[in-house]
Amino acid sequence: MVVIVIIAVLLLLAWPALKNAVVKRDLTRTMNNGRELYLVAFRMATDGAAKADSSRSWPGDYPTNSLTEYCTKLVQNGYVTPADLQRMLSAPGAECQATMSGPPATLLLSGKTALKLYKIKAADPSNTVFAATSNYIYDTPLNPNTVPFGDAGFVVIRKNGDLGVYKKGQATSAGFDNVEKFQSDIGALPGAVTGKVDPGDGTTVLTAPP
C-alpha cells in the first residue's frame, strides 16, 4: 500500500512536466505540418507565376474567402492529396476531415482545423503571415480555452518560409521592444503598414469550414 501511494505521489509530481513535454511535441509536429502546407502553397504560387497561370496563386490572389476553395485548388492541381491535407490541418483537439466528392472533383473540409491561412498575395512582403495555429488571433493574448493549444503556445508561418513555435508572452506586440520587432519576429498581416498593428485578424483569414 505504501509503495502504491509513493508511486501515485511521484506520478502527480511528474505530471506537469509530462504534460508540457506532450504539448511541446504536438506544437512541433503542427509546426512541421505547417511547413509542409507552406511548401505546397509556395510551389503552386511559383509555378503559377512562372507560367502566367492565374489558377495557381497565393491565397489572397484568388477571388475567394474560403479555406476549402483554396485547398481544392491545391488538390485539383496535384500539389497535395486529401489525406495529406487532412494530416497537415489536424492537431490534438482540432481534427479536420478532408474528402472528395463529385464529379466534378470537389474537396470537402469539415471539423476544426488546427491551422488557419491568411489571404497573402504575391505583392505582400516576406514577413507577411501565411498561416498560424487556430488558437492564435493576431496581436491578441492567447485564450486558455481555445484549441488546439490554448495558451500553451502557438505556431506562425511567414511568407518567406520562416516559422516557429512561440510562447504566450509573444502573442502581442507588448511582448517586444517595439511594433516593428513584433512584425519582424511574428509577422505582419496582409496589407499591413509597417510600424502599426491592430489586434485581431480582421478579414485577412480564409474562412474555416463550418
Image: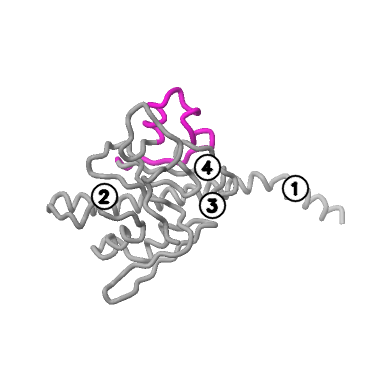
Considering only vertical position in the picture, is 69 above or below 162? below
Q: Nearer the viewer, mark 3 or mark 4?
A: 3
| Image mark for residue 153 | 4
SS type, badge 1: helix
First to last magenta residue range:
160-186
Classify residue 51 as left or right of residue 198.
left
| Image mark for residue 147 | 3
Circle 4 Cα neighbour tier, 10 Å, few/some/many (<14 / 14–19 / ≥20): many
For label 2, the residue is: 58
Precedes in sequence: disc 1 or disc 2: 1
Q: How many marks?
A: 4
Q: Residue furthest top?
A: 177
> Marks 3/4: CA distance?
11 Å
For label 1, the residue is: 10
SS type, badge 3: loop
* Pointer 3 with pointer 1, Cβ within 8 A: no
Q: Amino acid at mark 2?
A: Trp
Residue 26 part of the magenta-drawn span:
no
Precedes in sequence: disc 3 or disc 1: 1
Image quadrant occupied by the N terminus = bottom right
Circle 1 Cα neighbour tier, 10 Å, few/some/many (<14 / 14–19 / ≥20): few
Q: Residue furthest bottom?
A: 103
SS type, badge 2: loop
Residue 183 part of the magenta-drawn span:
yes
Q: Position of residue 67 (x, y in %)?
A: 36, 57
Q: Amino acid at mark 4?
A: Gly
> Marks 4/2: CA distance?
27 Å
